[in-house]
Structures are given as C-alpha cells and as structure tokens.
Amino acid sequence: MKKRKLGAIPPGGLFFLPLLALLAVSPARAQELEPRAYSPNPTGANFVVAVYGYQAGDVLFDPSVPITNAKAYLNSAVFGYGRSFGLFGRLASVGVVVPYVWASMNGDVYEERRDITRSGLADVRLKFTINLLGQPAMKPAEFMKRKPQSTLGFSLAVQAPTGQYDSTKLINLGTNRWSLKPELGFYHPAGRFTFEAAAGVWFFTENADFFGGKVFEQNPLLSFQAHVSYTIRPRMWVAVNATYYSGGLTTTNGVDASEKQNNSRLGLTFSYPIGKQHSLKVAWAKGVTARVGDKVDIYSLGYQFLWFD
C-alpha cells in the first residue's frame, strides 16, 4: 500500500484536527475522570502537580468521512498549581494546568496510509471551584476536628486557546477557540467510602481560522461522572470511576461534520502518600463505547507537593 505524509491529505482529512486537539488536552481535562474533585479541604492549602500521561487507541470518525483504521498515540507532561481559600464563608479553590504533548497518529484515507507527528504546548486549563452546601471554609486546625458531611459544589473550567496552532496545517495541538464548562458536583462520605456524582456541559466558541479559511463550530457537549472511592488510611485511597459524554455535533462552514458523541469510559485511581507533603497518584482509564471521537486507553502517573500558609 502506498504511504505518504499526512500533509497531502484531501479535504476529508481536516477532521483529524479537532479530534487530535481533544485528545491532546484530555490528560489535563483533570481529568474529566477525576475522583474527589469536590471533596472538602482546609483553607490555605497550596499544591503543585506534575503528571505524565500516555494514551493509545482507536479514533472513530463519522461514517461519511473517508478515514478508517485511525489510531493515536500521545505522551503528555502536565504541570499545575492550585490553592484553596475561603470565599464568603464557603470553601473555594483555583487551579491552572499547562500541558505539553508529543503526539503521533496514523490512518487510512481513501485506502492510502497516512502518518503525522506533533509536539508542543496544548491549551492551558483554569478551574474555579466552590462548595455551595455543606463544608464551610475552615482553617487546618478546625478542619481536623470536623465531622464529615455531604457537600454540593460548583465549578467553572476555562480552556484558553494558548496551544500550538497553525491554520495552514491540518492537525494542531491547540484548538484556537475558548471552551467553558460549568458543572455541579455532589460528594457524600459514608465511613471509609465516598460517593460522588457530577454533571456539566462544555460550551465552545467558534474557530474562525480553521484549515483553508473555514469556520469550525461545535455544539455543547454534556458530561457526566460517577466515582466510588475507599480510604485505606489517611490520604491513601482507591477509586472506581465512570464518565459519559453526549452531544458535541461539529460543523464546518455550517455543514455537519460529525455525528453526536455518545461515549463512555471506565477507570481506576490509586493515591499513595509519601510523608506529610508528598503523594503519588496512578490512574488508568479505558474507552468502553464511542460513536465518534476517541476510544483510547489512558495511563498516568502524577506527583503532588502540598503545603499550607
């Protein structure tokens, strides 16, 4: 079979771009499959994180797109900082993550094999979270004496168009658009177990500088998460995770470019403390169902350093 570089792809190949951008940031999308995102913490907590992630698996396109047997392989290094504080008597936190990605993808376009590689910065992610009900803002000494209780929280994630992007290329690591995700999350402790659920929706601005001078748009994408975790000892825990996405129909110059997503993923997370200020986190997730989008296995290893004011 004849083999050429992906740069020679015909118009159908431009559907690679938004999908690779989605894959590139997914290690940071805190992961969208992140347990204990709404668990209470004391105020004045600061933490830095460094995470290595690897993703590999199938990329599924709308049947009308002549791209088959597509696979993606991504390595990522994510660095972040977060801080908790009191806001109007409620517990709140802010965080920022910056991902760097090394990616390769291959697939058959009109029965011709194509390959591509990319490396560089993906889009920066910022997130604000506040507990609406339940846990109020507490300093560390008060927090240690508290009685665990259920909490209802709200978060707003913002993804900025800071990643590597070139409109003359079919595939980029950046999306060249803003993305916003408001979300409600519920956290309930029950002895050593905790139960969590979250529902949110991603909203996207248009990319007016898509390949070939086109306008790329995407409808809102619904996101649901559920987690059950078990505490082995303080700061050591394991969690079973599940997530589901629905919607996200894309258009190029007003013409439908993909079907709606109906994708699900399952995963496991293990957190291990190293002393009072350091911890490691290992996570695995697997795509279970996917109509359009990625169906990949994700592996990550993270390090966190925590300190208080």
Image (spheres, grey):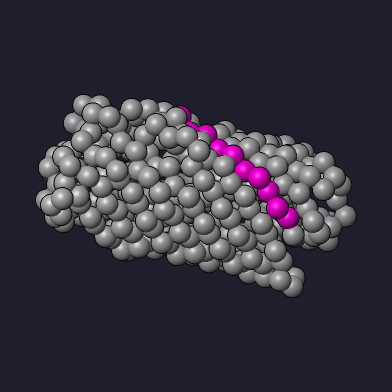
User: Which residue is pictured at 48% across the width and 42% down the height?
Assistant: 287
Left or right of 238: which side holds 148? right
Helix, strand or loop: magenta stretch? strand
As drawn, 282 above or below 130: below
Q: Position of residue 233 (x, y in %)?
A: 81, 59
Q: Is residue 96 above or below residue 245?
A: below
Q: Residue furthest bottom?
A: 275
Which one is in front, 82 or 284?
284
Res 183 visible = no
Q: Residue 37: image x %, image y %?
A: 63, 48
Q: Start and end of the magenta stretch?
A: 237-246
Quarter of image, res 81: bottom right
Q: Is residue 288 magenta?
A: no
What's the residue at 55%, 38% (across, down)?
243
* Between 240 and 35, the one nearer to me in the picture: 240
Q: Residue at x 51, y 46 (%)?
A: 286
Q: In the visual, does 256 lie left or right of 245?
A: left
Q: In this image, 294 relative to 254: left or right? A: right
**Rendered image quadrant of residue 101:** bottom left
Please state the horizontal and vertical placement of residue 52, each as a whole percent of the image: 49, 64
- Residue 66: tell me if it is visible: yes
Q: Position of residue 44 (x, y in %)?
A: 69, 61
| Residue at figure coordinates x 48%, y 50% from the top left | 297
Count of numbered labels shown in the rendering: 0
Q: Quadrant of the C terminus?
A: bottom right
Q: Is residue 241 magenta?
A: yes
